[in-house]
Image: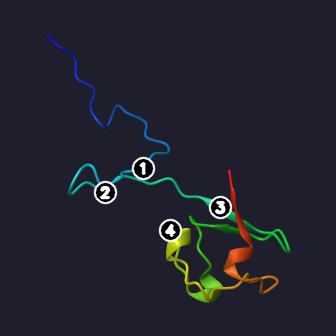
């Protein structure tokens, strides 16, 4: 008899569902971006509650007019953290 691995047996830590499986919502990798002016880190996992940006908001969905909550630097002053 063939053994089959189920999703309960798998440990999923960090991957993206690029829309290849319709109707399936898989966890996505969340990233961080650092302000080049003050070193504040925007973490997609946490968002920015002070600016009503909910947890899980990806960088591309952060409004263009959003500014750093620490030093007011514009969004274009943030670098992707690898």
Q: Measured along the vertical axis of the image, is residue 30 above or below residue 61?
A: above
Residue corresponding to mark 2 = 25
Residue 44 is left or right of residue 15, and the answer is right
Residue 50 on image: x %, y %: 65, 86
Residue corresponding to mark 1 = 16
Residue corresponding to mark 3 = 32
SS label for mark 3: strand
> Rounded to the nearest whole Å, what is the CA distance between mark 2 and mark 3?
21 Å
> Rounded to the nearest whole Å, what is the CA distance between mark 2 and mark 4?
14 Å
Q: Which residue extends farthest left?
A: 1
Q: Choose between 26 and 73: the one closer to the eye.
A: 73
Q: Give the mark nearer the N terminus: 4 vs 1.
A: 1
Q: Quadrant of residue 1?
A: top left
Q: Measured along the vertical axis of the image, is residue 29 above or below residue 11?
A: below
SS label for mark 1: loop
Q: Choose between 7 and 20: the one closer to the eye.
A: 20
Q: Which numbered dot is residue 56?
A: 4
């Amino acid at each position: 008899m063939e053994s089959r691995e189920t999703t309960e047996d798998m440990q999923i830590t960090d991957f993206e569902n690029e829309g290849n499986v319709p109707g399936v919502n898989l966890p996505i990798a969340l990233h961080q971006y650092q302000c080049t002016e003050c070193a504040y880190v925007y973490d997609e996992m946490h968002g920015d509650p002070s600016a009503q940006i909910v947890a899980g908001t990806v960088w591309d969905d952060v409004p263009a007019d959003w500014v750093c909550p620490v030093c007011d630097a514009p969004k274009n002053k943030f670098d992707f953290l690898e």
